[in-house]
Amino acid sequence: MKKKFSNNQLEEIAVSEINYRIARPQYNLRSEIKSGDKGISFDGNIEVFKNNSQTIESRIGIVPVQVKGTQVENFSGNTRSFSLEMGHYRNYYEEGGVLLLVVEIKPNGEDSEAKIFYKQLLSQELKNILNVSKNKKKKAVQLRALSETNISIVCRKFIVERDKQPKSLLEYDFGEKNFDSYELRSLTYNPEKLETKNIFDHYFNMYGIMKGQTPDSKPLMVPLDHFKFDSLATEGQQNVTIGENTYNFNIRRIRKADKTLVIMENVLYLEHTPKRKESPFQFKVRRFGSLTSQKKILPFLIDLLQGDMAKFPDGHIQLNGQSSQLKEGLKEITVIYDLIREFENVYKYLNINELVDLQDKEGEFYNTLNQLYGLNQAINHKKYDGFTFSNPTESSFVTYNVGGKEVVLFYNAQSEEKIINGINKDIQPSGFMFQFQNTKRQFEHTPYWLVNSKTLIESLNSDFDIVKDTFNQFDPYLDDDVFGITNEFCLHYLNLYDQLGNEKILDLVNYIYDKYDSDTKGESEIVLINKMQINLRKNNNLSDNEKEKLIELKFEHPQKHELQFCINVLLGNIAEADYHFKKFSEETISFYEGLPIYTLYTRLKELVSN
């Protein structure tokens, strides 16, 4: 029958084992822990000195201690957990922390063996425990084996770190304070020792650093959190060599406790899991990304799948090129690479930058590849199986999805070449006739009225110069009716600028208004006001000359409330703009709320109110 120690015996053995280690002269410590003299939550203190003289002058401080003895059949490994009632954690927090020492005691014949575990419980961690576990009766914490360090180091680190976590700072509300810098500190992590070098095994304290108000004042360290790392990430350009080939990749490396993930060009995922002995390395192309990325990644993969060693700056990878699975993978990647080279012609024809990321999500590589394949079939091979047309007899613009982006195409029902680039100089206004609903009169205008404006601006093959050029092929201000259509186009794109912030939109609208010839058609208040809107958005201000023009116009038409409203918004006169806006009818207010001048008005009101 195995020997069973009483609680008093466990306590005496535990205290004895701890005091034995404290008593070593080189540690400069003095124990104030006594058996049978236990208090509530605390069993005594350890005094820490600078040297072995143990004088008043050499005293550094004290470390409050709680000791727990527990009988075991077998010792735990490098760590173990221990559960305590929540009331103990509250008491520890009020006192600024405690050194928890748990002694495992294993009977050995007439004697016993012991293994000590420690946990430096300080205010930041205790605050976290009390916040997260406030509705629980107990909470377990993880302790580490004292054998990986010594009691002197543990105590000295406790004092240094405790002084950085006063309750006054922990309980002060710093709000969303942006600190000058941040610092991470660990009581247990030591990369120089085998037992403590795994960063994922250790807790860290994070501090925000606030610089002093004067050059002589010390910076303030504010405790912010106590946590373990789930993963660590690094990113940068690296050269990878396979045989005679050297590749330069953007590499993001994510280290976790059990594996390392290497993400190359944000598309290729290489996973290294040492515990998976038969196939520790696995790879997958998770996204398409850009054509440039694929042209770099796929040749690298072909080399790798042939069994060549890939040498990274901090290690290497070599796959078994003779396995049947890798041989099949090599065939597949080779076919995909041949397709990628065909896609170059598609990109060139559509004027798509090969560096542009298609914004496809993780796991969407093959979906994006199939979309590009359909586009390639249509443009390079005149095969249109990937397209569905609602009215096959009617020509129209077509939006085609590729990844998370779009391409503007044109379906020509009357031609053998049915799919062409939807944004190209061959698509001219003369090929499109618009019609006024009320008069049925037909007129020419830009065909890009027929394309969704956001798609036109953000599509992969977007080309502002081609859109501008369509306005050179007809008179956008032919008469009042056509003027109205052109102005509506411009106002629509000014609204779009306020959503997207793309400066090229302002250049497009300004180019169209510059087509207005005031010498032959007379001055236009609409063109003047809207060009001023463009300049105000571009420069955040108007020139003195522009302001003078607006003031002259203001005095010329004092009773035109709509004009007065626009002028005063542009001049920043909020009171006068409010006055004229209140004179509008409900119908006029509703109309103006959809105009870009109203956006400037609301921004002006917000600026004044703040």
Image (spheres, grey):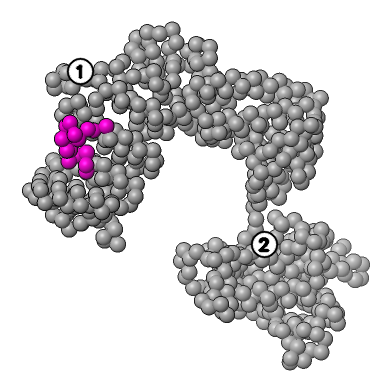
Give x and y (percent) for residue 589: 16, 44
Query: Where is mark 2, residue-wise?
Result: 203
Q: Is residue 527 magenta?
A: yes
Circle 2: residue type: Tyr
Q: Nearer the viewer, residue 70 or 343?
A: 343
State the residue at coordinates (25%, 20%).
Answer: 444
Disc on res. 392: none
Q: Secondary structure at mark 1?
A: strand
In the image, is residue 526 part of the stretch drawn in magenta? yes
Distance from disc 1 to disc 2, alpha carbons, whole Å, reads: 75 Å
Residue at 48% x, 65% y: name it: 177
Residue picked out by circle 1: 442
The quarter of the rendered structure image containing the N terminus is bottom right
On screen, residue 142 versus residue 74, left or right, reads: left
Mark 1 Cα shell of 10 Å, populated few (<14), some (14-19), many (≥20): few
Looking at the image, is mark 1 or mark 2 earlier in the sequence?
2
